[in-house]
């Protein structure tokens, strides 16, 4: 008897759903289902609600019922099932606005921009006058072009990237992200002003766009405008103060201005934030060396060797300090370690200019000056504007007691460079003073 009564109750419940669906109309049916779904949300999981709605679907395959089931799936984290139900909703009712909006947002969250774009084109084709559809279609189109532009930019196709990113700006001229990505699509060495303009546009549209501030700082750094670079790094760090990369670059900019205290402070913060970053550790040790903090520099360089025994230049850096401290055998050991590491790396890339210069410095350290000179000359034949090669060649001449040749080399480097290096001016002045003393 109890079982029979239970079946009657279920039948009555089903009939109540049927009555609502048939007589109150689509809008009221949606409202009713939304209410049921919201109640279900308060009592997760909603398995029972899904079961009941699926039963109703068996008898009432309405678009609104599919939509409710889709929402229940979505609330329970079952996105794939939800997507299928939203699609069924739109197959049955091509003007179901909320289904378009919700499904498009699911696609956006999944970064499925192509699917979202195709969906909104269909929506605009049948519902051209709905403001919510228009606004979301614009957002989807913008996201699609930004994502596509970024992907082709990562593949190295700058021209195609610009085309897509300019399409993004046509959709939304106030997209800071589009301007930022367009800046990335240009080479700052060849198109400095375009890069600068796009980054300034991005910052103007979004003053808290810290990546744009940092990138603009890097652009100024590359141009040798270290004061302006520091200003942009400071803006970036005021927004995101735990950016180790910005702190590292600001430290190097201060180093180039010989503000060693500020440089060390920034680099120490960067190292604390990213202790496994060997490059930052090496930069900190190099600044300490230039500031005359040799013990701290040695400790820093050794920490680099422990993490990467063949890190570029580190053995030459240690050799130079030991040589200045009169620790001749330790210096020679480091220079030989540099040569050993360099020869291994040279087998992988025999034309690497940085590696050839590094080897030249090491050979100069063990007094094989002609061999060192030939390595630098190989670099300068391939790239007559290589600043580091000129500085290394000048050091080779100085170490082999040829100050006139060292001075001529540095003067040539100075003429070829658009940047002003304080240490270059100081080195030239030091050599001139050395030559004057030798004449007395």
Image (cartoon, rainbow, N blue to C red):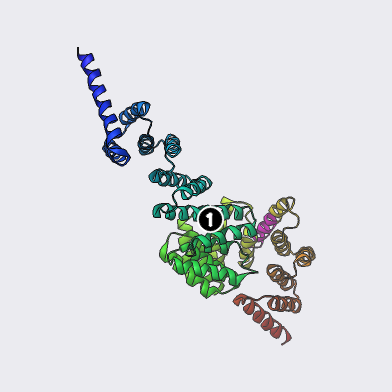
Inspect this view and state whether residue 261 appears: no
Name the residue nearer the viewer: 294 or 410: 410
- In the rendered view, would you say 277 is above or below 82? below
- In the rendered view, would you say 284 is above or below 3? below
Residue 187 position in % (x across, y down): 63, 65
- In the rendered view, would you say 400 is above or below 11? below
Q: Which residues are magenta?
A: 327-338
Residue at (31, 42) in percent of width and height: 27
Examine the structure image and report whether residue 230 is included in the region drawn in magenta: no
Name the residue nearer the viewer: 300 or 124: 124
Q: Is residue 7 left or right of residue 237?
A: left
**Quadrant of image for the C terminus:** bottom right
Task: Give neighbour class at mark 1: few <14, some 14-19, many 20+ (Cα, 10 Å).
Answer: many
Inspect this view and state whether residue 172 appears: yes
Name the residue carrying label 1: 146
Residue at (29, 29) in percent of width and height: 18
Residue at (50, 54) in percent of width and height: 141
């Amino acid at each position: 008897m109890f079982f029979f009564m239970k079946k009657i109750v279920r039948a009555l419940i089903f009939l109540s759903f049927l009555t609502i669906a048939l007589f109150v109309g689509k809008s009221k049916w949606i409202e009713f289902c939304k209410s049921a779904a919201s109640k279900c949300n308060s009592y997760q999981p909603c398995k029972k609600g899904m079961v009941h709605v699926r039963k109703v679907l068996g008898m009432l395959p309405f678009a609104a019922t599919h939509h409710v089931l889709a929402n229940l799936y979505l609330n329970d984290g079952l996105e794939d099932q939800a997507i299928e139900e939203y699609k069924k909703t739109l197959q049955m009712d091509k003007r179901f606005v909320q289904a378009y909006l919700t499904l498009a947002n699911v696609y956006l969250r999944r970064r499925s921009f192509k699917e979202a774009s195709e969906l909104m084109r269909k929506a605009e084709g049948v519902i051209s006058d709905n403001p919510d559809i228009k606004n979301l279609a614009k957002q989807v189109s913008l996201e699609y072009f930004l994502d596509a532009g970024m992907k082709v930019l990562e593949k190295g196709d700058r021209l195609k990237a610009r085309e897509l990113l300019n399409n993004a700006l046509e959709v939304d001229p106030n997209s800071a992200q589009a301007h930022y990505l367009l800046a990335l699509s240009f080479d700052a060495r060849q198109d400095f002003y375009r890069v600068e303009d796009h980054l300034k546009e991005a910052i103007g549209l979004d003053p808290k766009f810290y990546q744009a501030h940092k990138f603009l700082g890097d652009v100024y750094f590359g141009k040798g405008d270290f004061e302006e670079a520091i200003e942009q790094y400071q803006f970036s760090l005021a927004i995101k103060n735990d950016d180790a990369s910005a702190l590292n670059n600001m430290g190097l900019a201060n180093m180039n201005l010989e503000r060693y205290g500020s440089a060390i402070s920034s680099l120490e913060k960067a190292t604390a934030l990213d202790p496994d970053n060997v490059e930052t550790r090496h930069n900190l040790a190099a600044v300490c060396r230039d500031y005359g903090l040799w013990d701290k520099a040695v400790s820093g360089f050794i920490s680099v060797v422990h993490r990467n025994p063949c890190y570029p230049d580190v053995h030459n850096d240690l050799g130079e300090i030991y040589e200045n401290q009169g620790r001749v055998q330790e210096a020679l050991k480091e220079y030989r370690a540099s040569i050993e590491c360099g020869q291994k790396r040279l087998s992988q890339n025999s034309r690497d200019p940085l590696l050839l210069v590094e080897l030249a410095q090491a050979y100069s350290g063990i007094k094989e000056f002609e061999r060192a000179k030939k390595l630098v000359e190989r670099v300068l034949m391939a790239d007559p504007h290589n600043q580091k090669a000129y500085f290394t060649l000048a050091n080779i001449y100085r170490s082999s007691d040829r100050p006139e040749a060292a001075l001529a080399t540095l003067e040539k480097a100075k003429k070829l460079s658009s940047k002003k290096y304080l240490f270059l001016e100081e080195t030239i002045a030091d050599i001139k003073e050395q030559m004057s003393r030798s004449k007395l």
